[in-house]
Amino acid sequence: MALRDESAVQAACGIMHVHGRASGGLRRLGVDYASAVAGVLAVHGMLAAELARVRGARVEAVRTSVAQAALLAVGQYLAVATTDDDWDERWECGPRPPFRSQDGIRFELEALKAEGWQQFWSHLGAEPADVAAGWWPFQQRFATASCALPESLMSRTRRFPFRDLLKAAGQAGVSVLPVRDEPGQPTRVPACTFRDLPGSSRARPWTGGEPLDGIVVVESTRRIQGPMAGHVLRMLGAEVIRVEPPGGDPMRGIPPISGDSSARFRVFNDGKRVTEIDLRTAAGREELRELVAGADAFVHNWAPGRAERDGLDADELARVRPGLVHAWSSGWTPLPWPDPPLGTDFLVQAHSGLAATEPDRAPSLMTLTDIMGGLVCAAGVLAALLRRERTGLGARVDSSLYSAAGVIPRSPAGPARLLERDGRMVLLDGTPVCTDLRELAADPRFKRALNHTTHVSPQPPWEFA
């Protein structure tokens, strides 16, 4: 069956299922997200093909599809559902953010550490047992796309004006941001910004294979946004050298396990060459410089100011490797926050207006800007590499979750109309709706688009000819 439009793709490829987990039903995203992802994938393909052509390849065409884009977007959830681990992942619907203040302001909260979570709620006088019960679903919402919190926490914030909640957040080291009512971004920014770096170079000639054959990328990233950028470049043929702390990235051990590592981690990091370096030490930072000296691009998503503090900023590394493409994938660049909030997916959805496209004006707990942020960063790297082949000049490339949110069109999309037929849910045009990602993995329509190992993951979403 052909997937005729965005709604059919979201239905068949698992987006409605994942997005709907938090509310306990099947829900279409309020934006044409799969189409937006496909558009960026097409840009990747065109830039990679032209880069290969400039280096001597004969590439005449590139193809991708909205369905392949959708499968890439649900890749981590697909891997978890199909791992050979006996992990029983559960998601529950129930009271969930956004929270509401006494003066009626709806807001999102972000706490990356349990201490900050505990301190925030302690300032509000919440019961310790409720705070403890809420931490696990809150922490896991990035992975499960659900977040059922104790009702006592949701009602607790309604006792305080927003200014007091801001003060409590500041004292606890967490971030709160209002959920904007308007779908448009409050500040329009480019998807990527570019700045010339000193020195010049070009990549080695293309020797056959994938478009980025011979390109070397060093990556120091964590979570989803940064690793996704390196994942795209690796799928296009680059050698990606992943720098992890001594003992490896802690994300490797988060269940469920697929083979010898976390299924979620593997979706974004399989195929990369890993080296462990302690960047907290001078010797470790020098080791990174030596790696970069032999690379074409360096990608990181460190916290603001870290690169400059450690002497690993774009200008410093360009002296080590003239012609380097240095890419920083952040949370909020280039917004001029005097004291920036934590740069994470759901805060960005709240502030960028993306959440306002949903009927309940709540950020989707599917990681929309994390995925798009990584894709936009990769596009920036490809554009800078192509420019370097033509001019010899390296570049610093800045992008962010916020800038990536602006790539997603905000044209309104109504809810998908569903009906039950022969015991399963379908759209009005008869497109079956995925309600189980394991069934999607076994669907013969997607056989060529999926890779089956100890878990199922999306194949590279381009075809070059």
Image: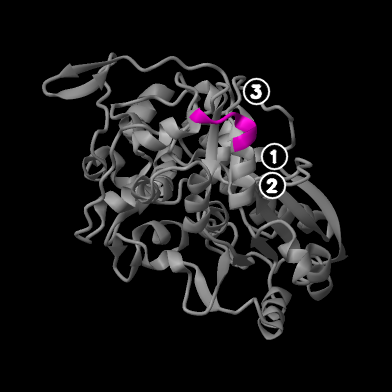
Q: Tag 2: residue type?
A: Ser
Percent x, y of residue 56: 67, 59
Q: Does dot 1 land on a helix, a strand or a loop?
A: loop
Q: Earlier in the sequence, mark 2 or mark 1?
A: 1
Q: Which residue is mark 3?
A: 184
Labelled disc at residue 191:
1
Residue 399 disc label: 2
Q: Residue at x 43, y 47 (%)?
A: 142
State the separation of the CA atoms marked 2 and 1: 6 Å
Q: Residue at x 30, y 26 (%)?
A: 26
Disc 3, disc 2: CB below 8 Å?
no
* View extreme (right): residue: 198
Marks 1, 3: nearer the viewer = 3
SS under mark 3? loop
Q: Locate residue 248 relative to residue 58 in the image: left or right.
A: left
Tell which circle, 1 or 3, labels the residue nearer the N-terminal end: 3
Q: Nearer the viewer, residue 97 or 245?
A: 97
Q: In the rendered view, does 308 fall on the left or right side of 84? A: right
Amino acid type at circle 3 is Gly
Which quadrant is home to the N terminus? top left
